[in-house]
Structures are given as C-alpha cells and as structure tokens.
Image (cartoon, rainbow, N blue to C red):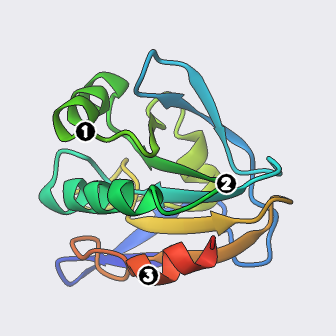
Amino acid sequence: MATTMLKGNTVNLAGNEVNVGDKAPEVTVVNSEGLADVKVGGAQGVKQLIIVVPSLDTAVCATETRNFNKRASELEGVKTTVVSMDLPFASGRFCSAEGIDNLTVASDFRNKDFANAYGVLIADGALAGVTCRAIFAIDENGVVTYKEIVPEITAEPDYDSALNAVK
C-alpha cells in the first residue's frame, strides 16, 4: 500500500497504484461547470496533465490550482485537469472567484472512481475519504509518463517537473 505524509504522520493510500509506464485508467469525473461528465486518463490523442488535490478550500490547493492555471496557458495541446473530492458547486465558485480558465476543474465525489483507479484515495487519518496531492502526466496513447505523489500533503508539488513531462 502506498503512503504519503500529513504534517509528519504517515497516511495510507487506497486503490490501484498506477506507475510510470502503466496504461492510465480512463475514468469519468464531474466538471465544475454544468455538472458535465469529463473523461480523464486513457488514450485521448492528446497529452494530459492530471493534478490531484485534497480540496480547493485549503490554501495550498488553491495556490497550486492558481499556479497551474497560469502555467497551463503555456502548454499547447495538453488537456489539464484538476481533480478533487470537492462538490462541483464549491469548485465552480472557486473557479469563478479566482479566474480559473486555462484548465478544467472536476470532482470525483460521486463514486471515488478516479481516486480508487489511480491509488490516491486517503484511507485513514484526518483526511480519510479525500484525495492526496498528486500529479500524473499521460501521453497521447494513454501511458503514464510522470507521477508524483507529493511526500507531504501540505506541501506544493514539483511544478517544473510536472510541466516538463508534458512539453
């Protein structure tokens, strides 16, 4: 079972661990705009950057999403999606207030299919039931080319490595 840390305490992750070189599972999540289904993963004919955060309602997740929104505008032909367990209504309000318009913000609240398929569901501790902080880059053929499970949930990811993985 994979793990991460929350304020220095080990947190177990549930679900199927996905690694570099694996086929990225195709999963349906819910867009924060209009509650439309959004497919992430799988072979989509374009590169994908999937940014996983626990909740946009926290300072680190909000900062991370703002940073990726700004930097995603530099990426050509890359489908960039932020996935959390936040309700689509809450993430929609966040996007409107913060001007998030260069990426898709989606929710895995219905069945936790994404969190389980990618092995990023926090299984225990204070944040049990939400996603950890992680990033997956997927090539046009649906193969995972980059993975980061951020070692400390309260820390920001390695932005440069993630973005370089899809350039």
**Which residue bears the numbered disc 2?**
77
Q: Is residue 34 left or right of residue 164?
A: left
Q: CA distance from mark 2 to mark 3?
A: 18 Å
Q: Is residue 125 above or below residue 130?
A: below
Label 2 crowd bin: few (<14), some (14–19), many (20+), radius 10 Å? few
Sequence-first tag of 2 and 3: 2
- Say which of 161 and 71 sits in front: 71
Q: Please identify the quarter of the rendering in which residue 155 is found.
A: bottom left
Tell me the residue at 13%/58% (across/down).
Answer: 59
| Residue 77 pos. (x, y %) | 67, 54
Q: Is residue 28 left or right of residue 98?
A: right
- Say which of 85 and 39 sits in front: 39
Q: Please identify the quarter of the rendering in which residue 40 is found.
A: top right
Tell me the residue at 57%/62% (across/down).
Answer: 119
Tell me the quarter of the image containing the N terminus. bottom right
Tell me the amino acid under the disc marked 1.
Gly
Q: Is residue 1 visible?
A: no
Sequence-first tag of 3 and 1: 1
| Residue 25 pos. (x, y %) | 75, 52
Tell me the quarter of the image containing the C terminus. bottom right
Q: Residue furthest top?
A: 34
Tell me the element at label 1: loop
Q: CA distance from mark 1 to mark 2?
A: 21 Å
Q: CA distance from mark 3 to mark 1?
A: 22 Å
Sequence-first tag of 1 and 2: 2
Q: Which mark is residue 160?
A: 3
Q: Is residue 111 left or right of residue 103?
A: right
**Which residue bears the numbered disc 1?**
99
| Residue 19 pos. (x, y %) | 69, 75
Label 3 crowd bin: few (<14), some (14–19), many (20+), radius 10 Å? few
Q: Which mark is residue 162?
A: none
